[in-house]
Image (cartoon, rainbow, N blue to C red):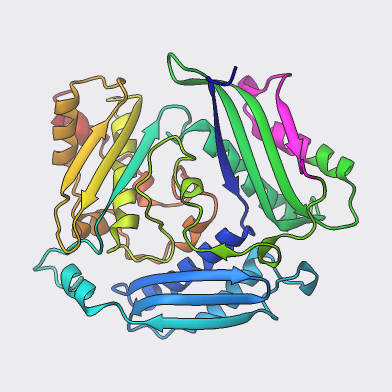
């Protein structure tokens, strides 16, 4: 029976799509470092021996896009030509224009506090939180992220020296559907790039040991299935074997499929783009609602029209877990949180150069990094607005 199972996936820092995300966000950070009001919409494509950087950037910053790309690729771990893609030999093509004057006019002047900012695009975004983990995130995606982050640590520390930068982790969890509670780990799949001179038995042994150390004891089960490199060897990986594009891992970046998604990608976009800032604001609201004990699960949807400041819609969904009337909860959230672009940017301090850190390991549930949208600092205000002491 499979009706009580749920699966999520994460990908490693050297996965081609994540290489592209990190280059785009590194360029965004470099612009914001010098000019916090930069307007950036940067897309990257990586392939065998090639990096293409394109998009619209309006900034006073002096930025060498090619140098940033090479430094990012080096930091990820593609430093040797034997990997088929490395920071020294790859060719880099750039095609950067300024932001459309029509979009710029619709958004407004960000450094003019006398006027509100309009949304940088139309669209709708979702934020989600649940009480499955201390981070108030779904358990499957959090464990998948934990596995790929650990692969990075094992490789960079030299403890497992045969690992290479590309990898994927997939986690299937069995739930008690009547309470939407994770019961046990059902299946874990780890596909990790490796040196050619290591045998699969060694990889399987090391990966099993690593995974079992990462799983909470109460979630381990003797019947758990563990598949390591199930197709066999995984020597050639990264951009040498597969094209990577910015914004193609939007489910990995968010909630692993446990929540709906508006379709907009995050990386390479400055915070006037509500695809990014609106999704962060929705997570901020949803997490505070769950942290306040007002629901066990919460999904927040926001929608915008380009050039308009106020959202065209706002909705809180608790899947029947609300501890108060949902209409009251919607009103309380609307009162406590600002969802205009300027309100979001100022509240969450989104003009900081923090974005490359988001481009691997997920944008949410990262309490070890000062991502302001993960703060639960509105709990008291929410409870007061809801009439709860």
Would residue 223 appear left or right of 337 to someone viewing this image? right
| Magenta region includes residue 303 | no
Percent position (x, y) of residue 235? Answer: 80, 57
Percent position (x, y) of residue 117? Answer: 17, 64
Q: Where 75 falls versus 287 (above or below)?
A: below
**49 or 295, nearer to the observer:** 49
| Residue found at x 64% / y 59% | 14
Residue sitting at the far left: 114
Q: Is residue 65 among the parts visible in the rendering?
A: yes
| Residue found at x 16% / y 30% | 384
**For residue 221, which quarter of the picture?**
top right
Q: Quadrant of the N terminus?
A: top right
| Residue found at x 50% / y 70% | 44
Count of numbered tags: 0
Q: Where 35 falls versus 370 (above or below)?
A: below
Percent position (x, y) of residue 344? Answer: 24, 54
**For residue 364, which quarter of the picture?**
top left
Residue sitting at the far top: 178
**128 or 16, nearer to the observer:** 16
Please provide the residue range marked out in magenta.
207-231
**229 or 136, nearer to the observer:** 229
Percent position (x, y) of residue 124? Answer: 28, 49
Q: Is residue 389 among the parts visible in the rendering?
A: no
Q: Quadrant of the C terminus?
A: top left
| Magenta region includes residue 216 | yes
Would residue 219 appear left or right of 235 to someone viewing this image? left
| Residue found at x 46% / y 27% | 132
Would residue 182 appear left or right of 261 to someone viewing this image? right
């Amino acid at each position: 029976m499979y009706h009580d199972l749920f699966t999520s996936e994460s990908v490693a820092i050297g996965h081609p799509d994540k290489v592209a995300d990190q280059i785009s966000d590194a360029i965004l950070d470099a612009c914001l470092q010098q000019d916090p009001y930069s307007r950036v919409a940067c897309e990257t494509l990586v392939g065998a021996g090639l990096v293409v950087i394109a998009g619209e950037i309006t900034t006073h910053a002096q930025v060498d896009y090619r140098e940033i790309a090479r430094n990012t690729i080096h930091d990820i771990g593609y430093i040797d030509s034997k990997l088929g893609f490395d920071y020294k030999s790859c060719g880099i093509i750039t095609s950067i224009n300024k932001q459309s004057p029509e979009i710029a006019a619709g958004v407004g002047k960000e450094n003019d506090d006398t006027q509100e900012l309009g949304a940088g695009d139309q669209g709708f975004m979702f934020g989600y939180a649940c009480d499955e983990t201390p981070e108030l995130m779904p358990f499957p995606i959090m464990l998948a992220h934990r596995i790929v982050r650990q692969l990075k640590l094992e490789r960079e520390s030299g403890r497992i020296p045969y690992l290479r930068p590309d990898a994927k982790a997939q986690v299937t969890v069995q739930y008690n559907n009547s309470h939407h509670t994770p019961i046990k780990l059902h299946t874990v799949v780890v596909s990790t790039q490796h040196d050619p001179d290591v045998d699969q038995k060694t990889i399987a042994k090391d990966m099993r040991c690593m995974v079992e150390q990462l799983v909470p004891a109460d979630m381990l089960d003797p019947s758990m299935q563990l598949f390591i490199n199930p197709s066999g060897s995984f020597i050639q990986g990264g951009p040498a074997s597969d094209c990577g594009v910015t914004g193609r891992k939007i489910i990995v970046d968010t909630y692993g499929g446990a929540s709906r998604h508006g379709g907009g990608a995050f990386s390479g976009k400055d915070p006037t783009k509500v695809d990014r800032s609106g999704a962060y604001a929705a997570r901020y609201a949803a997490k505070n609602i769950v942290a306040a004990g007002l629901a066990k699960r919460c999904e927040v949807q926001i929608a915008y029209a380009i050039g308009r400041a106020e959202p065209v819609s706002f909705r809180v969904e608790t899947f029947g877990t609300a501890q108060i009337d949902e209409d009251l909860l919607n009103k309380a959230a609307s009162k406590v949180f600002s969802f205009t672009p300027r309100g979001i940017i100022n509240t969450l301090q989104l003009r900081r150069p923090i974005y490359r850190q988001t481009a691997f390991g997920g944008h949410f549930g990262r309490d070890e990094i000062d991502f302001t949208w993960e703060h639960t600092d509105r709990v008291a205000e929410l409870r007061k607005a809801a009439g709860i002491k």
